[in-house]
Image (spheres, rainbow, N blue to C red):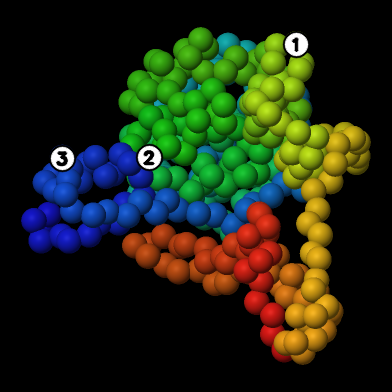
């Protein structure tokens, strides 16, 4: 089969390497298109009282299949309970392993800690995301996991295995944690995964806090001085479009006010002579600039049982983008 392929579509680097291992020729072109999610839907705008800070909330979404290695997670959580850490773990999905996993939960005495919801709607899934502190995906095989992207979009830090594309989903120790797959003892080791008992859960500061810390390291030196050639306008833009939204989602924050710096703006100088020559009025120019500075959403495309969100990205990023605005008369 591999000898007859003239172009390949993959969703992760790991699957590309697997294709090479099975005979795909390295001189044949390929296109890597990773799955996407609707970030306008998976956004946690009401984090204030969504979670119980006295109870560790964990969740996983996926088919109840041996590839997901729920068994290792459940055994690891039994160890967590034995160490005196109270938790609630929600498994969303159904599949052939359901009866086996429920029996394991019963045998380990975790009936009051582990919940099987079965298959539920996306709106119902949002409720569990909003109250969860960590997302677990300890798969043995995983091409690329949309649920991990959804968790990060919701501000829920993921703990995943290094199975195939999962290590591309998560930046280890920055946007989550990546640990060795098929190693339950390693997964249970308190020195390998975050020390959950000592973590003071503050909903909304999950992933966004991680990103803010990385951002701070990039723009300040050890003494707090600005580095890297950032000017006041660039710092204000970062504050308005990144830091502000990250802090606004934190528990107890009602408003974030931007102070200092310069707000980025573009000024369009029109030529009255050329406007008269081409019979163009000022409102034509205003309309053209407005229409050239917006994103456009479309429907989704289903390819290989994965949905891809079609969007037109059209926000102005430079003066050249404004110069390319098309004026309709």
- Decide if residue 137 is on the left or right side of residue 120: left
Image depth: mark 2 or mark 1 in front: 1
Element on which disc 2 rests: loop
Please report the residue visible at 41 percent of the width from the left and 30 percent of the height from the top: 161
Q: Give whichever of discs 2 and 1 has the lower sequence position.
A: 2
Is disc 3 placed on a helix, strand or loop? helix
**Residue 173, image x and y in percent?**
54, 23
Q: Earlier in the sequence, mark 2 or mark 3?
A: 3
Q: Is residue 211 visible?
A: yes
**Label 2 to label 3, Cα distance in Å?**
16 Å
Residue at the spot 15% in from the left edge and 60% down from the top edge? 5
SS of the residue under disc 1: loop
Residue under circle 2? 165
Q: Quadrant of residue 68?
A: top left
Disc assigned to residue 307: none
Query: Looking at this view, is 253 or 77 the one in front?
Result: 253
Q: Mark 2 Cα within 10 Å, few/some/many (few <14, many 20+)? A: many
Q: Left or right: 59 with respect to 259?
A: left
Residue for point 52% across, 42% down: 148
Is residue 82 shown above or below 302?
A: above
Q: Residue furthest front?
A: 273
- Which image quarter holds the N terminus? bottom left
Residue 145 or 127: which is nearer the viewer? 145
- Residue linked to disc 3: 21
Measured as percent of width and height from the top left, residue 307 is found at 46, 62
Residues at circles 1 and 3 in contact by the CB criterion of under 8 Å: no
Say left or right for 287 vs 257: left
Q: CA distance from mark 2 to mark 1?
A: 38 Å
How far apart are the two marked residues, 1 and 3, measured between alpha carbons? 49 Å
The label shown at residue 223 is: 1
């Amino acid at each position: 089969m591999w000898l007859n392929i003239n172009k390949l579509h993959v969703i992760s680097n790991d699957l590309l390497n697997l294709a090479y291992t099975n005979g795909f020729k390295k001189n044949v072109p390929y296109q890597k298109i990773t799955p996407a999610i609707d970030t306008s839907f998976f956004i946690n705008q009401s984090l204030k009282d969504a979670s119980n800070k006295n109870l560790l909330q964990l969740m996983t979404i996926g088919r109840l299949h041996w590839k997901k290695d729920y068994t290792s997670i459940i055994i690891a959580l039994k160890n967590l309970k034995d160490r005196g850490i109270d938790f609630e773990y929600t498994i969303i999905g159904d599949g052939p392993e359901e009866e086996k996993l429920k029996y394991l939960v019963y045998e380990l005495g975790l009936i009051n800690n582990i919940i099987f919801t079965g298959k539920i709607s996306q709106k119902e899934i949002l409720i569990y995301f909003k109250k969860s502190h960590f997302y677990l995906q300890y798969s043995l095989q995983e091409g690329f996991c949309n649920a991990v992207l959804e968790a990060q979009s919701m501000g829920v830090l993921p703990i995943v295995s290094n199975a195939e594309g999962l290590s591309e989903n998560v930046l280890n120790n920055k946007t989550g944690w990546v640990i060795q797959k098929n190693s339950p003892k390693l997964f249970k080791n308190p020195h390998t995964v975050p020390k959950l008992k000592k973590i003071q859960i503050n909903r909304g500061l999950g992933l966004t806090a991680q990103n803010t810390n990385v951002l701070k390291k990039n723009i300040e030196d050890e003494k707090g001085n600005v580095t890297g050639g950032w000017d006041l306008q660039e710092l204000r833009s970062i504050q308005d479009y990144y830091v502000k939204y990250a802090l606004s989602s934190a528990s107890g924050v009602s408003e974030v006010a931007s102070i200092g710096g310069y707000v980025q703006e573009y000024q369009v100088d029109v030529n009255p002579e050329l406007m008269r020559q081409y019979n163009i009025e000022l409102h034509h120019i205003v309309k053209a600039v407005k229409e050239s500075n917006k994103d456009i959403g479309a429907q989704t495309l289903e390819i290989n049982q994965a949905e891809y969100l079609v969007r037109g990205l059209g926000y102005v990023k430079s003066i050249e983008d404004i110069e390319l605005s098309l004026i309709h008369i």
